[in-house]
Amino acid sequence: MGILEVSNVNKRFGGLQALGDVNLDIAQGTVHAIIGPNGAGKSTLLNVLIGKLVPDTGTVMFDGKSVLGRKPYEINQMGISRVFQTPEIFGDLTVFENMLIPCFAKRDGTFRLHALESIASEKGIIEKAEQMLSDVAMIDKRGMTASSLSRGDKRRLEMAMCLVQEPKLLLLDEPTAGMARADTNNTIELLNHIHESRDITMVIIEHDMHVVFSLAKRITVLAQGSPLVEDTPENIKGHPKVKEAYLGEAAA
Amino acid sequence: MLGLSKKDTTFLVVVIFLTLMTPILLQPFPEGSVLAQFNAGYPDLMQRFAIYGIFAIGFNILFGLTGYLSFGHAAFLGVGSYSVVWMYKLLGYNVVPGLLLAVVTAGLFALLIGYISLRRSGIYFSILTLAFAQMSFNLAYSVLTPLTNGETGLQVYTDDPQILMGAGSPNSPHFFGIVMNESAKIDVGGWQFTFNNGYYFCAIIAIIVFYLSLRIFRSPFGIMLRAIKTNQTRMTYTGLNPRPYTLAAFVISGMYAGLAGGLLASMDPLAGAERMQWTASGEVVLMTILGGAGTLMGPILGAGFIKYFENIFSKINDDILHTWFAALPDGLEDAIVFMVHPFIGKGWSLTLGLLFMMVVIFLPGGLIEGGNRIWRLVTGRSRNRNTPGKDAQHHPKPTAHVN
């Protein structure tokens, strides 16, 4: 039994079957990639996992509890963090302030009226935020406004904000979309490092095969809303069904 | 000191000094000189500076930090005023019970309006708050006449109970015997300085609430509010529920507004429905943006500017202009007076409007940004260094704070 279990999930948008009988069992500590051509239902599936969409039928169990019907902030408090396709950070705040917010959220829960406490007196939180910034080599950028960072650094910051919450599961939505090859390789390295040093389960949705095969321990191929195959990267590479669905007839 | 960093403590000390010295600082011109009419050191106006300063500080906690633009804050101002006058009528002229009641009722009122309005954001939130404020205005004006005395306005009558009034109690608003409308006048050379009890009462409260707002700005709660303004998506996916944060900010700013309204009635024991009208709500928006939304001093500066224009520019008339330009040849004098005429007297709002447009276009960070630019020019310091009065640590890019 894995940390995340998706059973018989169906989702329709009008006449379109976006997800049809999706079953997934994601093992604790693995890196699981979900791939598939455009329109295969990858994003819909991700949105179901983080509570943005409620499926028509089926269950999604995380760590023994259902995530369905919960708000995104409740799901985050259960231990699921999400990295977006375009980095979502607090653009007007400094890098350091960006790091403080997840630290407070982790400690204080969804809301706390700490209106008259001073940040300077929160030694533990500050230490934690600084430690994390050092870990991702951004400590020298702590005073910069987050919106002025390079795209790669924004991604790095967003990931650090997720990691500082020590999530049990990290969801990554095309983490290298629109990146140059060098940045992509840096991100792969960073993710591999995170996985090895922290033992976090990761679910990655990705187009770029280079990224998928460099990271994933297991791969699920989605096509037209349903899982086609699930296997190790080595077996997926040569799988005829995958080639057909993903690369079209020309490659098959 | 007081839970503030060294820089903030210095800042606070400067603000306290300026506030307490206002009766002297606003009287730069000797009595009887041509420019004496530009003096603003008279009690009525100074009280307004302090009171509308409080109003704007509170508004800034909501608008400046979270970016939620409320167009209905005058409702809380009115609620505060009515609360205080009712306490005069029932208990007596001591302002303390009234002010406490004003803060509490405004807070409850804000909780109700905020709970409903904050279900929407952006323009829909603004419209909802505006609708609530206009409803409150109309209720106060007609439906709730027994409570508000309708268009006459609520005031104290001789047959009111006033159960705490003793034989020797002052017959106008007072703070444990310190009567608000009493002043000490001191003549130094050609200058006359008026030290008014009411002004100092408002000023001390303004300093206290300014200190509280400084603490809020520097607190984890303050960071959360600014986070809401920049990215609510990231906020929810970081495990934080934005709704109670915005509601808390709304209630706090409503309480500030209630306090300001209560102080208005503490200076002058009247409360009228027009205090809740949408123009009053709009005024505080202008104050905050003019001074610099999201900065600590900006809203106070904006409030001062608007009240100064309203009270000083509106008093300049054609006759005064003629005396200024008397040295010029007659034709030229008339031409200049003719051209300046629309901008003075009743036209003060035109001048203010032009000023407002210039600020929004050229200084999106408000007057505070203008001040910072001048300061940098004078000192030749680089952009990244902290400058006094500026929130450099928290607002490295003031432009991003006005939408």
Image (cartoon, rainbow, N blue to C red):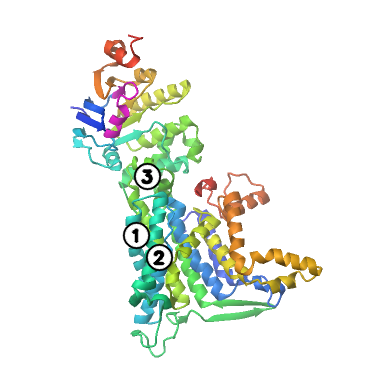
Q: Chain of mark 3?
A: A
Residue B333 shown left or right of residue B141 in the figure? right
State how far apart marks 3 and 1 are (Cα). 37 Å
Front: mark 2 or 3? 2
Of residue B314 and residue A112, the one placed in the foreground of this image is B314
Q: Are marks 2 and 3 on the same chain?
A: no
Looking at the rendering, in which quadrant would you find the N terminus of chain A?
top left
Q: Is residue B338 magenta?
A: no
Residue indicated by mark 3:
A124
- Residue furthest toward the right? B329
Stretch of the chain drawn in magenta:
A31-48
Whether residue A116 can be seen here? no
Residue B75 is marked as: 2
Tell me: residue A218, above or below residue A116: above
Element marked by disc 2? helix
State how far apart marks 2 and 1 are (Cα). 10 Å
Tell me: residue B64, above or below residue A76: below
Identify the amino acid type marked 3: Gly
Front: mark 3 or 1? 1
Of residue B16 and residue B22, the one placed in the foreground of this image is B22
Looking at the rendering, in which quadrant would you find the C terminus of chain A?
top left
The spot of residue A117 in percent (x, y) is 39, 54
Identify the amino acid type marked 2: Ala
Q: Residues within 10 Å of mark 1 (few under 14, many from 20)?
A: many
**Contact check, label 2 and label 1, Cβ < 8 Å:** yes
Name the residue located 31 percent from the left edge and 27 percent from the top edge. Answer: A42
Residue B9 shown left or right of residue A159 in the figure? right
Residue indicated by mark 1:
B113
The spot of residue B92 in percent (x, y) is 38, 82
Whether residue A86 can be seen here? yes
